[in-house]
Amino acid sequence: MSNSPINICIVDDHQLFLSSLKGLVSCFSSFKVLEGFSDGDEIVQYLEAKNPVPDIVLLDVKMKRMGGIETCTWLKNNYPSIKVLALSMEEDEENVLGMLRAGAKGYLLKDIHPEILEHAINEVYKNGFYYTDEVAKTLINNNSDSSKSGITLKERELEFLKLCCSERTYKEIASEMCLSPKTIENYREALFQKINAKSRIGLVLFAIKNKIVIL
């Protein structure tokens, strides 16, 4: 890794957590905290004022004014070089999928060990993504690779998988593919077995990692 520090901004609307996280990250070697913000609109204003651009943004998912998904989408559209690492107290499917679709490169629970946070930041900086065991291991085998494992997806399975990465519900996917909800359920269960996934998030992670979709 370069001797230059990894520049980080932190966005979280809980002031005590924000202050504690700034202090913690500042203690990690090779990291530099540029600034901390209490809401998404503050980092937007910071960047629009042509201040130094961070390499990584640690971004709270739920905030009062400009939430994590909206902020992450803005960052992806305006500063695609910035890698976002989402922070949340929850790992429900809606939040994880929402942040992935918005461009987040990782999703961390706030109660993780500091060493995992340090490792995650380094992984996102070097490799472009990171998911903790809590989020990823139960969703999809972290070593899944369609080309190495010999997994072959049929054309309709690929179509279904791509639609799973959209905002559509399973019922809407069935309508889009002109299939019954029961048939869509069968597609889902078959893919769960093929790629060793346990939820829709697992399907999305597989699609991202194997470049079936680019979010």
Image (cartoon, rainbow, N blue to C red):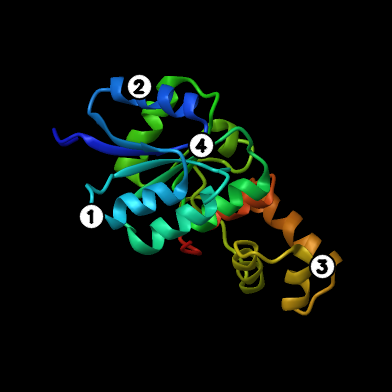
Judge the density around disc 4: few (<14), some (14-19), many (≥20) Cα neighbours within 10 Å.
many
Is residue 103 visible in this depiction of the protein?
A: no
- Point out the tag, 2 or 1, that comes first from the N-terminus: 2
User: Which residue is disc 1 drawn over?
Assistant: 50
Is residue 180 visible in this depiction of the protein?
A: yes
Residue at the limit of the structure toward the left, as seen here: 3
- Point out the tag, 3 or 2, that comes first from the N-terminus: 2
Query: In the picture, residue 80 is in which quadrant?
Result: bottom left
- Point out the tag, 1 or 3, that comes first from the N-terminus: 1
User: Which residue is disc 2 drawn over?
Assistant: 23
- Point out the tag, 4 or 2, that comes first from the N-terminus: 4
User: Which residue is disc 3 drawn over?
Assistant: 183
User: Which residue is disc 4 drawn over?
Assistant: 13
Mark 4 falls on what kind of element? loop
Q: Nearer the viewer, residue 191 or 106?
A: 106
**Residue at (64%, 36%) from the top-left corner?**
90
